[in-house]
Image (tube, grey):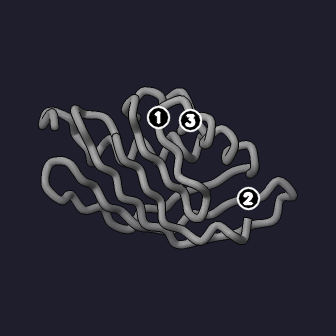
Amino acid sequence: MNTSVDTLSLTHALYQAVDRKDVDFLAQVLGETVYFQLGNFPAVEGLEAVLEANRGFFSSIEAMHHTLDDIWQTGDDCTVCHGRVDYIRLDKSRYSARFATVLRWQDGMIDDYRVYADISGL
């Protein structure tokens, strides 16, 4: 991994972008061959497929806000974090879930992005 990349700052920026439903930011930080898994949704691979999956998920909710409780670095290439995400559904009702995310970094980009959360209530 490129050690000049500040993965802690990028992790915070990632969650801010996700809360804004900013697919353009994701396109800048996800690698071409990225693997993505969100909850019980089918895993997807490849940048375009992952961006499309995120567009689809973002359009299924009104808004969301992540609160990160902890972030851990495991070596130079892995970030693990956990916290709470608060959703506003399209009908304006609310749902909250605990989550954990594992990010693997390669050459300053996220190449493996796994989100573990019970989002079945959405």
Q: Are marks 2 and 1 in contact (CB under 8 Å)?
A: no
Please tell me whether mark 2 or mark 1 is closer to you in this view: 1
Mark 2 near mark 3, Cβ–Cβ under 8 Å? Answer: no
Report which quarter residue 5 is drawn in: top left
Q: Is residue 108 above or below residue 8?
A: above
| Disc 1 crowd, CA 10 A, few/some/many (<14, 14-19, 20+) | some
Which of pointers 2 and 1 lies earlier in the amino acid sequence?
1
Residue drawn at the location 20% of the way across and 48% of the way down: 77
Dot 2 crowding, Cα within 10 Å, few <14, some 14–19, many 20+: some
Amino acid type at image mark 1: Gly
Q: Amino acid at mark 2?
A: Ile
**In this figure, which residue is indicated by the disc labeled 2?**
88
Q: CA distance from mark 2 to mark 1?
A: 28 Å
Identify the secondary structure beneath mark 2: strand
Question: What residue is drawn where x is 60% and y is 42%?
Answer: 54
Q: 77 or 87: nearer the eye?
A: 77
Q: Which residue is mark 3?
A: 49
Percent of width and height locating residue 30: 40, 35
Residue placed at 22% from the left, 40% from the top?
A: 6
Q: Going 35% across and 62% down the picture, which residue do you hit?
A: 81
SS class, disc 1: loop
Residue annotated with mark 1: 46
Horizontal side of 12 relative to 78 (left or right) equals right
Relative height, residue 8 to residue 117 (above, below): above
Quadrant position of the N terminus in the picture: top left
What quarter of the picture does the C terminus occupy?
bottom right
**Horizontal relation, residue 22 to residue 25: left or right:** right
> Would you call the spot at circle 3 few (<14 residues within 10 Å), some (14-19), or many (20 or more)?
some
